Amino acid sequence: MNFAYTLVYVVDVAASLAFFERAFGLPARFLHESGAYGEVDTGASGTKLAFVDHATARDSVQHDYVAADASAQPLGMEIGFTVANVPAAFDRAVAAGARALAAPVTKPWGQTVAYVRCPDGTLVELCTAMA
């Protein structure tokens, strides 16, 4: 078994793609003509970060779920990005419209981490790579 992708269910796929480019520097690599599905270029070969609109997601899952943007609290999962400069990445994300949740801090094991919440409700960790 191989990890292939993460799908984030959102209200507006194009808006999420645009936000992820502004906030994290991940350009859109694909947006379906329907606007219901899109992917960002993560720089990781074979691993995709994609977005799908709620109607398409609910049709596929055939079950309702908690939409991240509808929850006052972040969902119990995150997307993590390793970066060389966590404070700069955190500031960029907040300037692009993310909500600051946890400012950059260096953990006892030496890793610097910060957390933001995207307009679509997604929880994102920005961190240095583990040694």
Image (tube, helix red, strand yellow):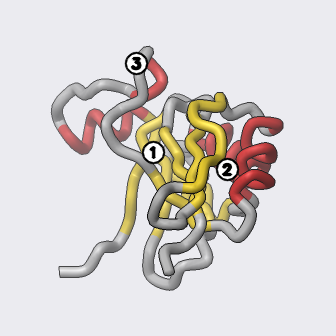
Q: Are marks 1 and 2 in contact (CB under 8 Å)?
A: no
Q: Residue furthest front?
A: 108
**Residue that numbered label 1 is attached to:** 52
Asked whether residue 92 is in view, the answer is yes
> Is residue 32 at least partly visible in the picture?
no
Q: Residue 20 shows which numbered tag? A: 2
Q: Report which quarter residue 106 is drawn in.
A: bottom right
Which numbered marker is on residue 71?
3
Dot 3 alpha-carbon crowd within 10 angstroms: few under 14, some 14 to 19, many 20 or more = few
Amino acid type of the residue that numbered disc 1 sits on in the rendered structure: Val
**Residue type highlighted by circle 2:** Phe
As measured in the structure, the alpha-carbon distance from the residue carrying label 1 to the one carrying label 2 is: 14 Å
**Do the numbered discs 2 and 3 sit on residues whose CB atoms are within 8 Å?**
no
Mark 2–mark 3 distance (CA, rounded to whole Å) = 20 Å
Of the residues under marks 3 and 1, which one precedes in the sequence?
1
Q: Is residue 117 left or right of residue 79?
A: right
Residue 22 screen position, x and y as percent: 78, 49
- SS assignment at label 2: helix
